[in-house]
Amino acid sequence: MSKRVISLSIDSGLIGRAEQLAAEHEGRSALFERLIAEGVRAVENAEIDAEYARAFPPGFTWPAEQQRVRDGMRELAAKHVGRRVGNSE
């Protein structure tokens, strides 16, 4: 992975606290990289959650045909898993 040097303006109190944590654990660059990665993942996950909420709003029910297909697939999967662990159903 390539890295790039950047310049940021961050509140001095926050930087001081971050530098204390970095000194105790992992180093400043590693700390900032990890925190930014976690923040990016959180935003991406929130976007996915929002897409699901739009697709399946409160009170959503599957149409009957789709529900039968989902139930059948779930039943087949359960039987398959049961055979794999020694269940003879």
Image (cartoon, rainbow, N blue to C red):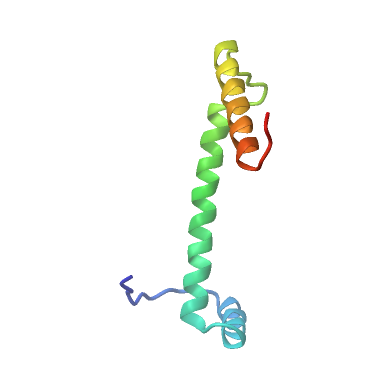
- Quarter of the image for residue 63 reads top right
The x and y percentages for residue 85 are 65, 43
Q: Is residue 40 above or below residue 78?
A: below
Q: Is residue 22 above or below residue 55?
A: below
The x and y percentages for residue 2 are 31, 72
Name which residue lies at 60% across and 11% down. Answer: 64
Name which residue lies at 63% across and 25% down. Answer: 75
Q: Is residue 59 above or below residue 49?
A: above
- Quarter of the image for residue 24 reads bottom right
Foreground residue among 80 and 65: 80
Q: How many marks?
A: 0
The x and y percentages for residue 15 are 55, 79
Name which residue lies at 63% across and 32% down. Answer: 78
Foreground residue among 71 and 31: 71
**Which quarter of the rendered picture does the N terminus lie within?**
bottom left
In the image, farthest residue toward the bottom: 23
**Which quarter of the rendered picture does the C terminus lie within?**
top right
In the displayed structure, does residue 88 sit left or right of residue 19? right
The x and y percentages for residue 38 are 53, 62
In the displayed structure, does residue 89 sit left or right of residue 73? right
In the image, farthest residue toward the top: 64
Name which residue lies at 48% across and 57% down. Answer: 40
